[in-house]
């Protein structure tokens, strides 16, 4: 039997493409998924609502898209000791009615230690997604998350370290990939995915769900120039100002 999958990511890692790809293999992504103006995130709307509620309840001051601190993750875990876990157990049970399911929401970086209290790890597999620093910087600034390269690098690295630490502490196996792995080496990456999760995904499956051209990075020099102009114009509003360049 296929294991359920939880994707842990800092965002803008091609996670929507990965999720859609797993959807081709029969994974349930939710009764309704969150849609943005230009794409479907393939994030279970009910999961996103639950994660937002957890953050409001346990750490209302966190702006997760613009800040990451290891202490925030620890603070949420400690605060959850007093939380009524029944609604979250019920949510897992509802998801399990559609096994195999896939959860994907960047907020899981902050909430996964709460969900860990109600998940069955024997039935769960993990995918950690990352992104090339420059590609991540371009994507962030084009979406008006104004960031220095240093901020992007530290934000991505620290979130990935936090996610890997969570899995290592519990001795949970995981597969770690980047968006660039999927785009630049699709055949090899599909092979790794199929081997780890016991699937039979093909290149045609990937081509069906991925709008970005394969065998090259998703952002080119024109994207870099545009991102640099956006960053320069909005420099005073950059994330992490006062703490880093």
Image (cartoon, rainbow, N blue to C red):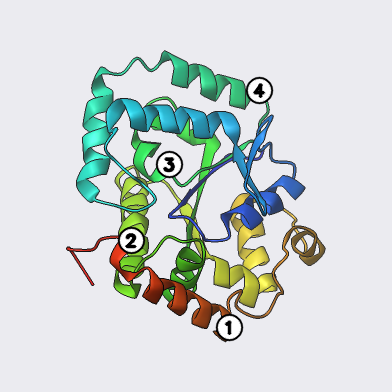
Query: Nearer the viewer's eye, disc 1 or disc 3?
Result: 1
Element carrying mark 1: helix
In the image, 156 versus 196, the foreground residue is 156
Quarter holding the N terminus?
Answer: top right
Query: Nearer the viewer's eye, disc 4 or disc 2?
Result: 2
Query: Nearer the viewer's eye, disc 2 or disc 1?
Result: 1
Element carrying mark 3: helix
Sequence-wise, the earlier of marks 2 and 1 is 2
- From the viewer's perspective, tell me whether residue 19 is left or right of residue 228: right
Element carrying mark 4: loop
Q: Which quarter of the figure has residue 229?
A: bottom left
Q: Is residue 17 above or below residue 30?
A: below
How many labels, in total?
4
Q: Which residue is mark 1?
A: 222
Give the residue drawn at x 39%, y 50%: 65
In the image, 155 versus 162, the foreground residue is 155
- From the viewer's perspective, tell me whether residue 174 is left or right of residue 167: right
Q: CA distance from mark 4 to mark 2?
A: 35 Å
Q: Which residue is mark 3?
A: 108
Sequence-wise, the earlier of marks 3 and 4 is 4
Q: CA distance from mark 1 to mark 4?
A: 46 Å
Q: Which residue is mark 2?
A: 155
Marks 2 and 1 close (CB-CB < 8 Å): no
Residue 53, image x, y percentages: 41, 27
């Amino acid at each position: 039997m296929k294991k359920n999958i939880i994707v842990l990511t800092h965002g803008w890692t091609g996670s929507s493409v990965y999720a859609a790809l797993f959807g081709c293999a029969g994974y349930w992504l939710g009764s309704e998924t969150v849609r943005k103006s230009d794409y479907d995130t393939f994030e279970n709307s009910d999961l996103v609502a639950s994660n937002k509620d957890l953050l409001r309840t346990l750490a209302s001051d966190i702006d997760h898209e613009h800040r990451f601190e290891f202490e925030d993750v620890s603070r949420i875990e400690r605060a959850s000791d007093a939380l009524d876990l029944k609604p979250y157990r019920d949510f897992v049970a509802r998801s399990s009615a559609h096994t195999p399911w896939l959860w994907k929401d960047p907020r899981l970086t902050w909430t996964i230690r709460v969900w860990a209290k109600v998940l069955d790890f024997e039935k769960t597999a993990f995918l950690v997604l990352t992104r090339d620093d420059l590609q991540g910087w371009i994507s962030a600034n084009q979406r008006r998350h104004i960031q220095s390269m240093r901020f992007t690098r530290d934000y991505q690295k620290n979130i990935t370290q936090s996610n890997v630490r969570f899995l290592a502490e519990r001795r949970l196996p995981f597969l770690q990939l980047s968006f660039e792995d999927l785009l630049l080496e699709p055949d090899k990456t599909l092979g790794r995915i199929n081997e780890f999760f016991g699937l039979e995904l093909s290149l045609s499956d990937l081509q069906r769900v991925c709008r970005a051209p394969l065998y090259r990075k998703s952002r080119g020099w024109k994207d870099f120039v545009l991102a640099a102009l956006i960053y320069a114009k909005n420099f005073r509003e950059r994330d992490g100002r006062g703490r880093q360049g």
